[in-house]
Amino acid sequence: MQIKFGTDGWRGVIARDFTFENLSLVAQATMDYLNREGLGNKPLVIGYDRRFLSRDFARRVAEVAVGNGIQVCLTDGYAPTPAVSWAVHEMGAGAGVMITASHNPPEYNGFKVKEAYGGSAGPGTTKILEEIVKYNVANGRRVVDCPFEEAQRKGMIRLFDPCENYFHQLSRYVDLNLIARAGIAAVVDPMYGAGSGFIPRLLASVDEIHNSENPSFGGLPPEPIDANLQELSALLKSGTYRVGLALDGDADRIGAVDENGDFFSSHCIFTVILRHLIEHKNLRGGVVKTVSSTRMIDLLAEKFGLELYETPIGFKHICELMLEKDILMGGEESGGLGVKGHIPERDGILMCLLLLEAMAVSGKGLRQMLDETMDEIGHFFYRRLDRRIEEIAKEQLIERLRSQPPAEIDGRMVSGTNFSDGFKFIFENGDWLLIRPSGTEPVLRLYSEATTADQVDRFLRAASVIAGL
């Protein structure tokens, strides 16, 4: 099979695509790359989540690393991706590998590469890894390994707990004592994932649901979106709690439920945390958003005189800018958010703590804080719609939109476009519509944001007509 890295790592269905054989090929290519780049003389950090066989897959990567002369620091249990990323940065490792499929359904697993700075491997690196895998297979390159127990006896594999130092970093960034004194009634849903138990270890008063080990994730993909957080929402509507927080399968993404029991989207979270960083933590810097993110970020950046950047979808693009420029915060629609003074990486646990800190400082709920900001910059409605589309129809649509993009949609003139990742049409008052064909699935993603919910629905219907769906 062809190994292809997506927006963050290589993923596949366990026993069909994600097999020990294919994993060994990817691991060998990774070790070849590290040795070629002079990084093989530094330790390799390896972590894993709670998915089926994740521990065994991680041990297999360790065997290949040692076989290629690379010393391994392997987490002594499941760990969140941001904790593993922090360990890569803090330990001065050559790189990191995280065995996880993040928010994908339970039948998937995956292989994420973290570079020495503690963030996701950039597009240039993952392209090289794909090429090395292809070259190795074509030329019969043998996978070189060392049995796990033998590698341990030789001292080439060291088990370690990534949590203590990661917790220390979080306690430096967020005022945990302030949050504790505020007495906020909070509940966390880690969705049976690798973030289970982490926030309650930092804040003993926080309750947690869905924290047992369950590789089927309770029958739902561990993605913190509205449809998957109904139990968390019901707890908030019961009046027991003031805020509900959620993490995806490897805890690098965040979701939330507000004081009314309503889903609090990543766009809302981005807006509230950005304002908190500016006004209460007195931080400054540029702001990065992906092409499918809310216009509220544009308006906040303008309000506070911060430079704004827009990238294609995928946190790796945000990471590149965080490495190149003074960036205060970057975020994407899927709930991946990163901040200055940490690592250039998504961190769902840190974002949960920052929301709690914002509540503690202001004494207000999430929805109240957002409404106050919207009263200043305008009220916005957002919706995403995923539609299945045949591959041929998808290719025809792409060609048509490239060669003959519509000048008018739903009776409104298009005033600007952004075709860096999909086809984004912008209207005079700032409303927008994004038609984005998936690069890996027979899916067409339609996004819209407007000043009325009715206009969002109208744009999405118009996009479906344009696509012939």
Image (tube, helix red, strand yellow):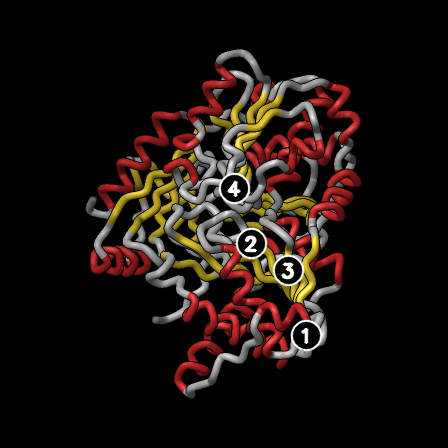
The CA span between labels 3 and 2 is 9 Å
Label 3: few (<14), some or many (≥20) within 10 Å? Answer: many
Are the two marked residues, 3 and 2, in contact with CB atoms closer than 8 angstroms? no
Badge 2 marks a residue whose secondary structure is strand
- Say above or below: 431 vs 66: above
Q: Is residue 268 visible?
A: no
Q: Nearer the viewer, mark 2 or mark 1?
A: 2
Badge 1 marks a residue whose secondary structure is loop
Q: Which quarter shows the C terminus? A: top left
Badge 3 marks a residue whose secondary structure is strand
The CA span between labels 2 and 1 is 21 Å
Residue 386: x and y, percent? Answer: 32, 42
Badge 4 is on which residue?
193
- Say above or below: 383 vs 307: above
Q: Residue at x 50, y 38 (%)?
A: 192
The CA span between labels 3 and 1 is 17 Å
Badge 4 marks a residue whose secondary structure is loop
Which numbered disc flags the more N-terminal residue, 4 or 3? 3
Amino acid found under the numbered disc labelled 1 = Leu
Badge 3 is on which residue?
74
Can you tell which quarter of the image residue 363 is in? top right
Amino acid found under the numbered disc labelled 4 = Gly
The one nearer the camera, 312 or 67, is: 67
Residue 420 left/right relative to 301: left
Question: Farthest residue toward the top?
Answer: 239
Which numbered disc flags the more N-terminal residue, 4 or 1? 1
Residue 225: x and y, percent? Answer: 44, 35
Label 4: few (<14), some or many (≥20) within 10 Å? Answer: many
Residue 319: x and y, percent? Answer: 61, 56
Badge 1 is on which residue?
39
Badge 2 is on which residue?
48
